[in-house]
Image (cartoon, helix red, strand yellow):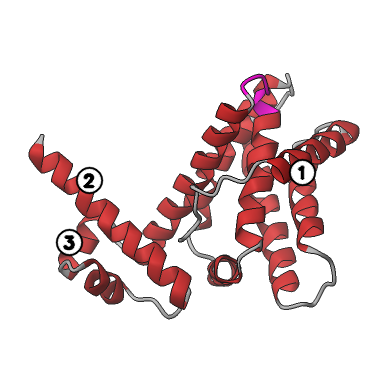
Amino acid sequence: MAKSKKGTQTKQNIITSARSLFYEYGYNKTGIQDIADHANVKLGTITYYYKKKDDMITDIYNVFFLALYDYVSTMEENLNLYTKYCYALVLYYEIILNDEHNKTLYYEVLVKNVNPQGRTNIMNTLNRSCLDFLNKNYIEADLEVIARSEYGARKELFINYYEKDVKFTGRAMIYFLIRNLFRLMNLDGEMIENTIQQAVEFSNKHHPEHIKFLV
């Protein structure tokens, strides 16, 4: 038990160091050795828990989104699964877009195409749950098409947004990204618009300061 607890603490120390360095220097300028030095552990200890830097990114993204989903569930217990998903997505993108360091890390990860499959596993699970909840007919291949199409569109749009090739606000960016996802899932257009608006109103009232993307 003690060994397991120590291992958990070591892994947490590593990912905390990674988040701090990613925030300060970005993805491209942060190496595995830098993270090991910051965490005061040997390089072999890092690779025991994370085979490569990409695996840390996957962990950071997934833990962050699930924390937001749980937060929404706690704050609004009567929301259905689809609505909670939408609310969490709005918070997710707002926290990223409203901090230049977060935004830069997100941009660099998209440009490098860092392990998109690992970072879409949770989304695929939630997409499936949403379709089941809303009694939508689909096959497994549909989920793969939705995931690939959403990722490709999000990557292109976000890169253009970050590089200022398109001119719209961060809030508009969030709206486009979420609307595109739910449209790919073939959800009702009016329902999408109403739910995103409700999610924005929720985010205007609730600020989960304790939940961080990086630091």
* Total numbered labels: 3
Q: According to the image, label 3 marks what residue? A: 45
Q: Which residues are magenta?
A: 77-82
**Disc number at residue 42?**
none
Q: Is residue 201 positioned above or below 17 on the image?
A: above
Task: Give the percent coordinates (x, y) of residue 80.
Answer: 68, 22
Q: Amino acid at mark 1?
A: Val
- Residue at point 82%, 72% (across, down): 166
Q: Nearer the viewer, residue 67 or 177?
A: 67
- Is 81 magenta? The answer is yes
Residue 142 in view: no
Image depth: mark 3 or mark 1 in front = 1
Q: According to the image, label 1 marks what residue? A: 200
- Residue at point 82%, 36% (across, down): 192
SS of the residue under disc 3? helix
Tag 2–tag 1 contact (CB < 8 Å): no
Image depth: mark 2 or mark 1 in front = 1
Q: CA distance from mark 2 to mark 1?
A: 36 Å
- Residue at point 61%, 66% (across, down): 99
Q: Amino acid at mark 2?
A: Thr
Q: Nearer the viewer, residue 207 or 116?
A: 207
Q: According to the image, label 2 marks what residue? A: 8
Image depth: mark 3 or mark 2 in front = 2
Q: CA distance from mark 3 to mark 1?
A: 42 Å
Task: Give the percent coordinates (x, y) of residue 201.
Answer: 78, 40
Q: Residues within 10 Å of mark 1 (few under 14, many from 20)?
A: many
